[in-house]
Amino acid sequence: MLIAQRHFLRPALYACLVISAAGCARLNAPGYYDVPHDSTYSDAQKQAQGPAEARAPSQVQLGFGDQANKPSQAPAGGKAAAAASELEMARPLREPKTFLGTVPCLGTPATCTANRFTLTLAPSGEWRSRSVPLGSTTTNSLAQQGCWHVIGTNPLKILLQLNNETPKASLTFVNDNVLRIDSLDGVAPNLEYRLTRQADIDGIDELKRQAVLNCRKK
């Protein structure tokens, strides 16, 4: 009787061991516990930025200059080729950039002061600027806009023109992040003055009600 019980218990014990091993294998299978969960930081980013498919990578909204990427407003024929060629030459301006620096008084010293000069350049060929006299407030600032054009390639030089095509400034790229002022308002400085790229883009909101320029047709 005892021998029969032993023979009966062995298969049962073996079956229990097999079931336990299968359960362990399932629990230890790769990815069993790896249920993906977004971090709080990722959740916050998604809520702030919206769905991924609604965002264009590396796109910065300036409030101006956005039409350049719309095919319906692209210049036709030879003008399109010329615009593409100019942008190709202006490699540092393939993305929006804001530069800042102190510009001296280049006119009659008794009638002007040095200015804090902010310049934002857009790949569409547009530029906007803000000049604030040192020691003053933004209420006394002068905001202007126009189109930029490549006038030299080695090193890269650009000309800023106002809406009436009057030259505003001639600038040289010392490197992708630094501009040298060659002339401003028709006057060439005796010393070297530079504008340095800023981390944040300044859309010059004072001009946000102004019509967007179509510089690539000029």
Image (cartoon, rainbow, N blue to C red):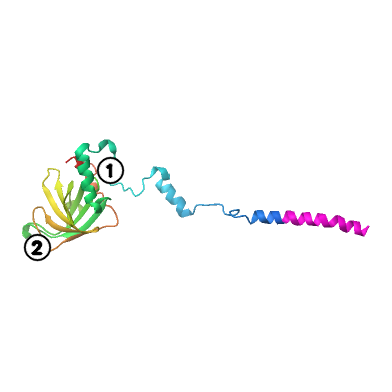
Is 218 rendered above or below residue 6?
A: above
Identify which amino acid the numbered label 2 is placed on. Answer: Asn
Image quadrant holding the N terminus, namely bottom right
Q: Position of residue 43 (x, y in %)?
A: 46, 50
Q: Position of residue 31 (x, y in %)?
A: 58, 54
Is 196 rendered above or below residue 50?
A: below
Q: Secondary structure at mark 1?
A: helix
- Residue 26 drawn in magenta: no
Q: Closer to the camera, 84 or 130?
A: 84
- Which residue in the protein does label 1 denote? 66
Q: Position of residue 101 (x, y in %)?
A: 20, 59
Which quadrant would residue 191 be assigned to in this image?
Answer: bottom left
Image quadrant holding the C terminus, namely top left
Q: CA distance from mark 1 to mark 2?
A: 37 Å
Tell me the tag on residue 190: 2
* Res 211 seen here: no
Instruction: Describe residue 202's horizontal placement relative to residue 150 as left or right.
Output: right
Q: Closer to the camera, 30 or 168?
A: 30
Q: Position of residue 4 (x, y in %)?
A: 90, 56
Which residue is depicted at the point 89% across and 57% down? 5
Which quadrant would residue 33 be assigned to in this image?
Answer: bottom right
